[in-house]
Amino acid sequence: MEMQAQAKQQETVEISFTQNVKVTMEQIKNMLVGALEGGSNYWYWISKINPPKNLDRHDAHNNIYNAAMNDGGSLVFVDKDDIKTDFFFGKAILDKNGDVIPKDDDIEEFVLDWNKIVNGLKLMAEKASNDFKNMIDGNDDEITADVFLQYCLFGKLIYG
């Protein structure tokens, strides 16, 4: 008696693989520009800019993208809903030191530095591969930039 092998049909096959991809500093800067100038500004406020070792405070404020991309620098983010804002213009209300005023004493801050950027890129590649591919291919937009920033700060998508 001859036995015939029957092909087992499956609807999906799960494949796991690792691929090395080079991301340029220009691509990272483009993601930060896209997020900070449009893609993410519906949910965040930058409460503090910590200049990197190679920039003074004035230069860091003039080019905030460099603050997070250079050694020792960072940007501190808060949720817009957690700070006091001007009723008419939606701008943050600052104290005499230039710091945002929280609505209550317990405000969560999220720090963006170089390590968070690298980790965010890895998470974006794993969990939002279409957005990551769009970034690599130059087909990114404000949504791609927002996804990038959220993976950098939170390790997942929280907003929009």
Image (tube, rainbow, N blue to C red):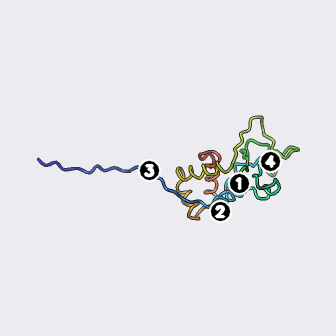
Q: Where is residue 122 in the image (x, y as percent from the top left)?
A: 56, 51
Amino acid type at image mark 1: Asn
Q: Earlier in the sequence, mark 3 or mark 1?
A: 3
Between the residue at mark 1 and the residue at mark 2, the CA separation in whole angstroms equals 13 Å
Crowding at mark 2 (Cα within 10 Å: few <14, some 14-19, many 20+): few
Q: Which mark is residue 120?
A: none
Asked whether the residues under the numbered discs 2 and 3 touch, taking CB atoms below 8 Å apart as contact, a structural biologist would say no
**Kind of element beneath mark 3:** loop
Q: Which residue lies furthest to the bottom in this view?
A: 138
- Circle 1: element type: loop
Question: Disc number at residue 16?
Answer: 3
The amino acid type, in three-letter code, at marker 4 is Ala
Q: What residue type is labelled 3?
A: Ser
Cα distance, mark 2 to mark 4?
Answer: 30 Å
The circle drawn on residue 26 is 2
Q: Nearer the viewer, mark 1 or mark 2?
A: 1
Q: How crowded is mark 1: few (under 14 residues within 10 Å), some or many (20 or more)?
A: some
Alpha carbons under labels 3 and 1: distance apart: 33 Å
User: Which quadrant of the structure image shows residue 103?
Assistant: top right
Q: Position of residue 131 (x, y in %)?
A: 56, 57
Secondary element at image label 2: helix
Callout 2, which amino acid? Glu
